[in-house]
């Protein structure tokens, strides 16, 4: 993990007045090393507007929640941090004791219903979610599917049906960068499980004990089985055990693979590979829903530009951290939304004209049957990634993987009981 300072002279976003704020303060920020350019530009804009300095401390994107929790456990505290705003992730850091309560800040009302399901724990708001909201979907190469003469799959049966046509081209049907762990989670969990979590039904059922994640007839085992079937049919990349999410992005962009399931946050990485030529990338790469049967997306507020203000014991910096959140959710917010080509999460900004992948994302988020991601209410969810990896690389059967995950889930449920 490295620390880097952003020059206050670098102003990328257009700025409005910043109001009376503390000046000359350095704020440490734990941030996801995969932050898109729009987020990094937001830090620069804040510096230029306020005279304060942002010291970024990289948290590896590969295993971001786990890496954050490990660093947190050492007792170190930043002034601000990007982090996952789900109930279970906030409990992992004991937000009640360790985070500043931001419930009285203006962004809460601007977020509206979003604040009720993201960044809020037991009635108190601890995070500002600037967006874009993440959807878990399939990045696909349009040229590969056109060459194969098959439609882009929207469910797992279609993934299996189109596999041979893609393989006949010498391409990988579905690329999984299981060496980064979370991509295995994306396909076996976030994508497949969208069909089963309307109104958080699955997550709530696990949390209250009415659903067991290792039910042999349940959707977790079914999802892991569907992925295992793709593996045994040769539909996954043979190097899945060591491939990374970066490898998956490159494989789809270069046309070596037809599809990979990743968070929509990775749109920027495709544009980067295209040298910033958005039109050329949009002509080649699409983003669409794939789930068990229905072809619907799931969504969640992710860590990028989701800000928490930990309690540090330094009153001046705690106040400055709140001022940072105030600035990025008001004065700097519209410029951030424009720069990110995103749908705003707050009512005090409007969406820019969207095209290509950004328009694909908007369509997914506006899908009438879109559901919250299944992880949001499940205690012990963080260990699911390893279970999914064990299936992707053929080290465990779907039932064994579900059984292994269930051990952690049940331990976490017991630990949360009073």
Image: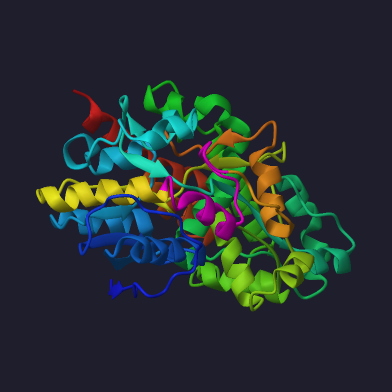
Q: Nearer the viewer, residue 286 or 332?
A: 332
List x then y, in percent, for residue 273: 62, 76
Quadrant of the frame with the N terminus? bottom left
Q: How many marks?
A: 0
List x then y, in percent, for residue 147: 87, 69
List x then y, in percent, for residue 169: 82, 73
Residue 67 visible within the image: yes
List x then y, in percent, for residue 24: 21, 64
329 vs 261: above or below: above
Q: Residue furthest bottom?
A: 275
The part of the chain drawn in magenta is: 329-349
In the rendered image, residue 332 lying in the magenta stretch gets the answer yes
228 vs 266: above or below: above
Quadrant of the frame with the C terminus? top left
Q: What residue sits 50% from the left and 37% below the top?
A: 374
Quarter of image, res 195 = top right
Q: What residue sits 27% from the left and 63% below the top?
A: 52
In the rendered image, residue 199 lying in the magenta stretch gets the answer no
Q: Residue furthest left?
A: 313
């Amino acid at each position: 993990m490295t620390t880097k300072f952003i020059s206050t002279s670098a102003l990328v976003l257009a700025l409005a007045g910043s109001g009376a704020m503390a000046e000359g303060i350095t704020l440490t920020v734990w941030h996801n090393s995969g932050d898109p350019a729009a987020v990094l530009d937001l830090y620069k804009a804040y510096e230029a507007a306020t005279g304060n300095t942002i010291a970024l401390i990289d948290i590896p994107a590969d295993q971001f929640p786990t890496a954050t929790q490990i660093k947190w456990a050492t007792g170190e505290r930043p002034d601000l941090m990007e982090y996952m705003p789900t109930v279970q992730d906030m409990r992992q850091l004991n937000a009640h004791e360790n985070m500043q309560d931001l419930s009285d800040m203006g962004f809460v009302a601007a977020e509206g219903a979003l604040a009720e399901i993201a960044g809020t724990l037991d009635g108190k708001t601890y995070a500002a979610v600037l967006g874009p909201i993440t959807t878990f979907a399939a990045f696909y190469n349009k040229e590969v599917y056109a060459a194969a003469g098959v439609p882009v799959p929207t469910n797992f049966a279609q993934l299996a049906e189109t596999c041979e046509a893609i393989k006949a081209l010498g391409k990988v049907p579905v690329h999984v960068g299981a060496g980064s762990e979370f991509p295995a989670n994306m396909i076996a969990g976030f994508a497949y499980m969208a069909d089963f979590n309307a109104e958080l039904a699955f997550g709530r059922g696990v949390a209250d004990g009415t659903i067991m994640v290792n039910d042999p007839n349940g959707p977790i085992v079914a999802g892991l089985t569907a992925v295992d079937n793709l593996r045994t049919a040769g539909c996954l990349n043979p190097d899945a055990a060591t491939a990374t999410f970066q490898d998956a992005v490159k494989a789809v962009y270069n046309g070596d693979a037809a599809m990979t399931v990743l968070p929509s946050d990775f749109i920027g990485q495709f544009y980067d590979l295209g040298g910033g030529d958005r039109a050329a990338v949009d002509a080649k790469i699409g983003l669409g829903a794939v789930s068990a049967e229905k072809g619907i997306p799931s969504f969640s507020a992710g860590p990028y530009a989701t800000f928490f203000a930990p309690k540090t014991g330094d009153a001046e910096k705690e106040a400055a951290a709140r001022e940072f959140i105030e600035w990025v959710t008001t004065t700097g917010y519209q410029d951030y939304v424009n720069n990110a080509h995103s749908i705003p999460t707050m009512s005090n900004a409007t969406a820019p004209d969207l095209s290509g992948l950004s328009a694909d994302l908007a369509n997914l988020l506006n899908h009438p049957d879109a559901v919250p991601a299944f992880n949001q209410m499940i205690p012990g969810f963080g260990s699911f990634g390893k279970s999914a990896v064990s299936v992707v690389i053929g080290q465990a059967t779907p039932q064994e993987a579900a059984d292994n995950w269930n051990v952690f889930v049940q331990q976490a449920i017991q630990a949360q009981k009073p």
